[in-house]
Image: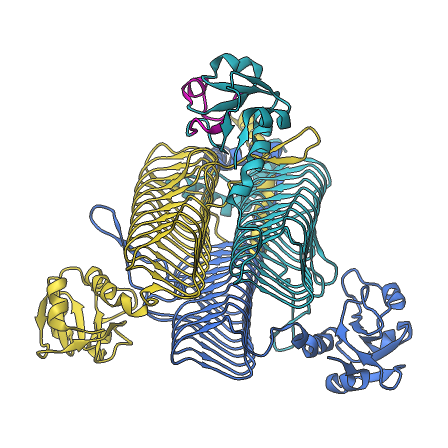
Chain colours: A blue, B yellow, C cyan
Amino acid sequence: LEFTVEHIAQIIEGQVHGASSNQFITDVQALTHAQSDHLAFYNPGQNNITPEDLRASKAGVVITTEDFLEDCPQAAIIVEDPRHCFAQVADMFLVKHLPEPGIHPSAVIGVGSIVHPTARIAAGVIIGDHVTIGEHVVLDPQCVIGNHVTIGKNTRIYPHVTIYPKVSIGEEVCINANTVLGADGFGFTPDKQGKWHKVPQLGSVKIADHVDIGAACTVDCGAIEDTVIEEGVKIDDQVHIAHNVHIGAHTIIAGYSAIAGSVTIGKHCMFAGGVRICDNLTITDKVILSAGSAVAKTIREPGMYSSGIGSLKASRWRRVLSRLNNLDTLAKRVKQLEKKCYD
Amino acid sequence: LEFTVEHIAQIIEGQVHGASSNQFITDVQALTHAQSDHLAFYNPGQNNITPEDLRASKAGVVITTEDFLEDCPQAAIIVEDPRHCFAQVADMFLVKHLPEPGIHPSAVIGVGSIVHPTARIAAGVIIGDHVTIGEHVVLDPQCVIGNHVTIGKNTRIYPHVTIYPKVSIGEEVCINANTVLGADGFGFTPDKQGKWHKVPQLGSVKIADHVDIGAACTVDCGAIEDTVIEEGVKIDDQVHIAHNVHIGAHTIIAGYSAIAGSVTIGKHCMFAGGVRICDNLTITDKVILSAGSAVAKTIREPGMYSSGIGSLKASRWRRVLSRLNNLDTLAKRVKQLEKKCYD
Amino acid sequence: LEFTVEHIAQIIEGQVHGASSNQFITDVQALTHAQSDHLAFYNPGQNNITPEDLRASKAGVVITTEDFLEDCPQAAIIVEDPRHCFAQVADMFLVKHLPEPGIHPSAVIGVGSIVHPTARIAAGVIIGDHVTIGEHVVLDPQCVIGNHVTIGKNTRIYPHVTIYPKVSIGEEVCINANTVLGADGFGFTPDKQGKWHKVPQLGSVKIADHVDIGAACTVDCGAIEDTVIEEGVKIDDQVHIAHNVHIGAHTIIAGYSAIAGSVTIGKHCMFAGGVRICDNLTITDKVILSAGSAVAKTIREPGMYSSGIGSLKASRWRRVLSRLNNLDTLAKRVKQLEKKCYD
């Protein structure tokens, strides 16, 4: 797979400078690692990358802005947003890294399931009954897809993902390795002896278009209604989404966060890593939670919220913690002093 | 698979009202989603479900209490605890959603292993040597079962579960997808250069009857003695149980909790989500930990314990946090004031 | 597989006492569980194990120190560090528990991949194209190894591990079950409508020799440079390592910890369980973090740091928490009092 610089420039609507006619590109690569048949990019203000790196790069062609045209050692494609255009070009080469089109002979497909002929079903994939797999879907090795699941076009499912029965997944979705979608929500009721009995979990999981979910996540099915992840939501690794959670469009959740049952989250929220939200709460649109925040009350106003504590030297923290545990007493002592001084 | 309303009512010991003779039910479903061949339930005081939903339901038959008989649009089965009876009926239909009985041709079974003829071994399952699989056990696609593992009757293991050698699992246990049982405990000792050397982990994991474990959990084997999970314990997704932990019967642990090595937990405890317990502690029976609690000391008295902090507006939290970090100084200033005012 | 006591003693350079000539040992076992054909060890000061256990043990031979020679009921091998020597002997018997040498017929191997003839490739393993598998590597059932991955000699990969393309793994590494190495880092940029667009992740993951990684971990690939785990690092279960993290040699990280993107961690650090580190920070060598510590600032000085809070009785914690939320006001009241009293 290769494309000419000219062809790439047309697709990203950029201007070519200095490319030889019929110069071919075989893959994308980072500026500092690229070879002469690679395309790289340089974005002003990019993390840890300097104009020196640009000048020293061996990339065959670099996507950048007009201001840096002079610094490009070889060919350039000039655009307004280099990073965004680079991502587009990266997608053009993606197919190089996919399993073969068609169904691998070791895959097992149940009765009544429809796999689009353009889909790529890798070795060891196991698909249940009455499943629908759309155009250009990629199922990586050893995914397990339960009965009555539907997967929309251009969606990619990485290895060892487990999808329980009846889950529905939209188009252009990406689910990373070892994630579990649709396991039963955690619903048990105690009897008089304190033994726990399972409450049947009858809902499922509904994932809209353009959702990304990281590796080793768990998204549980709903008890009655579905657990819903709306369009364009991005979720990092090791995130837990409990039953009946509803996440609004274009919300982004960093790694190691956990959302308890029946929480409703608005659109365009941004949660940093390690966030935890207690059950049955509502978080409105455009709420930002800083790293390690725990939310114990409904949030009705957009804005930034925090509860994270940063580490101190252990000896100092020990004193702080001992004071904290006795804070109620300290506050009462202050009240006494106030009585004494102001009365 | 279908049952008459009459047959179902006999099993749950309920009274039938308004069912036509030979009315058949093909599955259970939520009240708001049920069709005329489905059975649903209505529990007074149920979350988000109202008597209006009951009156509007298209369910063929509804399990409810005597008080709501009049609100049932079609047939009813009257019982004392509708939710519990519904769970019983749901179990009757469970078999519809299972893999076929017998051993799928793609499964691999080691030497000396005994698989009961009623067990259902799905595609891609890999069973080691000298394994015992009991009656009616269900192993979903691509489970890996190590050597010398025993699995008791009626237990269900979901896809991509890894069970290390020598783990023993009781009857009527449920292990959700991508969970790992019996990986080595985290035991290393440093040499004089500060390099870490593994301490062999010789114990295993012993899981008693009626235990439920969620998706993507890890339960490590013991260093010498076994890690033990007693009867009826229920564990949610993404929970980590380290080596030599002992969890008492009928304790329930919500998602995203982590129990460090050699912790002993009593019976009938209830841990909310995100709980963490430091190593070598003992938690007595009937301890309740609220969401996000961290336990750093042994707990000898039953009751509810907490350490979770809820988020504030970030600007306010920043001031609180700065005061917290200087709390020792503040306490000393209060002491000074007391000297000044009371002496 | 069996060895004579004499042969074992030579390897660990210990002195044999009381063994019959040609006494054979068939496996290692814990002191309290060992039978007459097993080797056990007794370390002075070992957790929960007493000299009584030693005297009562049925082990065929016990590795211990000179001081306890008299307490050994049967044969003994006397060394200076019994635990360390026991680990060496345990390694001699490890091969008993491995998959068969060679490639299982159900494994799938891509084009251009080189598997060393001494490697053990278990059932259901799927290896991509241009992969290199070194001497004596063990790939357990259903590992998925992406294209262009290299795995050094004597490395062991447990079931259901997913290794994304281009990851490189050193020698004598151990990766436990259901861990994911090399999934894309969490990189998205918003457009003007607040929709998120993926930033291509071009780096990979590089794991040096003698690294141990627990079960259900995630180590993401770097955005441009690689995510790097240096020699001898030990990582427990359920740990998340984000893109571009760099972990120095011989650092040890306990379970349920999460390291955010572009964090640099020094050598010989020790992190207890549940530690979280915010993105872009640097932690110097020999930093110790206690359980549940969150790090929000770069740490330049070795030593111990903390931020964990332990649980109190819920009623008391509720009062503390309410005081904490109003701590800024309390501090201002103290300031007022000081003005009043000292001016």
Q: Where residue C34 sits: x, y (%)?
A: 43, 29
Image point 81% across, 63% down: which residue? A49
Bounds of the magenta segment: C34-57
Depth check: give the residue in front, C210 or C219.
C210
Is A269 inside the magenta-drawn segment?
A: no
Decide if residue B228 is on the left or right side of residue C72.
Answer: left
Viewport quadrant of the N terminus of chain A: bottom right
Q: Where residue B128 sits: x, y (%)?
A: 44, 51
Image point 84% across, 84% down: which residue? A16
The answer to whether residue A146 is above or below residue C118 is below
Depth check: give the residue in front, A177 or C193.
A177
Decide if residue C88 is on the left or right side of residue B141.
Answer: right
The answer to whether residue A327 is above or below residue C41 is below
Is C37 inside the magenta-drawn segment?
A: yes
Depth check: give the residue in front, A134 or B98.
B98
Residue A296 in view (yes/no): no
Q: Where residue A146 sits: x, y (%)?
A: 41, 70
Residue B171 in view (yes/no): yes
Image point 9% across, 77% down: which residue? B18
Q: Where residue A189 sits: x, y (%)?
A: 27, 55
